[in-house]
Amino acid sequence: MRLQHYLGGLENLGPVNFFDKKVFMAEWEKRIFGIHTVMMAESTHLD
C-alpha cells in the first residue's frame, strides 16, 4: 500500500502505519520529479 493513498490518520480510521518510507516507488518517478524541478527553476515566466 502506498503511503500517499492511506488516509487512516486523517479520517479517524486509526493510526497511520509508516511501513513504506519511500518517496518514489520507481526510479523513473525520481527522474521525472528532477526534470520538472529543473524546468520550473529555469522558467522565466514564473518570476
Image (cartoon, rainbow, N blue to C red):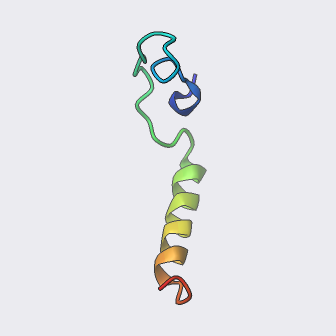
Relative placement, left or right, of 15 versus 5 is left
Residue at the far top: name it. 14
Total tally of numbered discs in the picture: 0
Q: Considering only vertical position in the picture, is 36 above or below 25?
A: below
**Residue 40 locus on image (x, y percent):** 52, 75
Residue placed furthest toward the bottom: 44
The residue that appears at 54% across and 33% down in the rendered structure is 4
Whether 45 is drawn above or below 32: the answer is below
Relative to residue 15, is residue 21 depicted above or below? below
Q: Could you tell me residue 41's position as x and y percent?
A: 46, 78
Quadrant placement of the N terminus = top right
Q: Is residue 21 above or below residue 35?
A: above
Q: Position of residue 13 (x, y in %)?
A: 51, 11
Would you identify the image quadrant in which residue 19 lies?
top left
Q: Pinpoint residue 31: horizontal percent, then vertical percent.
A: 54, 59
Nearer-the-camera pick, 41 or 15: 15
Q: Could you tell me which residue is drawn at 51 percent across and 43 percent down? A: 24
- The residue located at (54%, 48%) in the rendering is 27
* Residue at 40% in and 22% down: 18
